[in-house]
Image (tube, coloured by chain):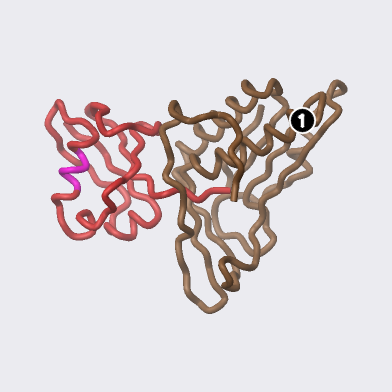
Chain colours: A brown, B red
Amino acid sequence: MWSRITSEPLQPELLLGRVGGAADGAVLLFVGQVRNHAEGQAVSGMTYEAYAEMASDELAQIVAEAAETLGTEQIAVEHRIGALTIGEASVVIAVASPHRDEAYRASRQIIEQIKVRLPVWKREHRVDGADAWVPGADPVPAERHNPHVRPGS
Amino acid sequence: MRVDVLLFAMYRELVGEERVPIELPADACVADLMVELRARGGGWSRLPGHVALAVNRRYASAEQPLADGDEVALIPPVAGG
């Protein structure tokens, strides 16, 4: 298992290389990237901020829970912080498992948990010059989390 | 006892501080800390009614007791990914 919070540009192909062995029939990659629109507004970039020490621990915990629930330890996740432009990757999740069902479920579970639990915030930079913090989710203490996958928005 | 309060994102902007040492009675819990913080007025008093907190990098409930040297972070609604 691998997880990291970093201010360096993410390299999805390197994370993919960390997972998957001869017994794995499925290797899945999720890349979250900055898009150029949000709620009808044109966006020029996004700045991510984190409580770095806690985010590191929490991301490792999210990965460990996905590994435990879904029976695969072939997981590598990185989240970037700092200023990102359109198209740059903010999060990369690589998962491998013998069969595709576990890989799809683990990948989904991890991104959904990141979105409700990781102490990371993002400031949206709009083309019209206005900046705003993106509204977030109220995090719940980890021990009260339901580790099952929840459909995202 | 003394705890260090950390502020992030919109809470940091609201209060105008990143890290603030706070003196508390020895038997204080997280809820007591929030009462103390809101009473400071200014941006502190404009924090929302519910604030998620982490003590020593783990999410904590209002009843959790605090200890000298604890690091308490006020966690705005999270928006990672």
Q: A45 above or below A103?
A: below
Q: Residues within 10 Å of mark 1 (few under 14, many from 20)?
A: few
* Displayed quadrant of residue A75: top right
**Which residue is drawn at the image coordinates 55% and 51% (left, top)?**
A81
Q: Is residue B34 magenta?
A: yes
Whether residue A1 is in magenta: the answer is no
Q: Mark 1 belongs to which subunit?
A: A
View extreme (bottom): residue: A128
Residue A33 pos. (x, y %): 66, 55
Q: Which residues are magenta?
A: B33-37
Residue in the image at 15% along x and 38% along y: B23
Quarter of the view holding residue A99: top right
Residue at image position (33%, 60%) is: B13
For mark 1, give the secondary structure. Answer: helix
Instruction: Name the spot of residue B70 as percent of width and height, x first.
Output: 28, 31
| Residue type marked 1 | Asp
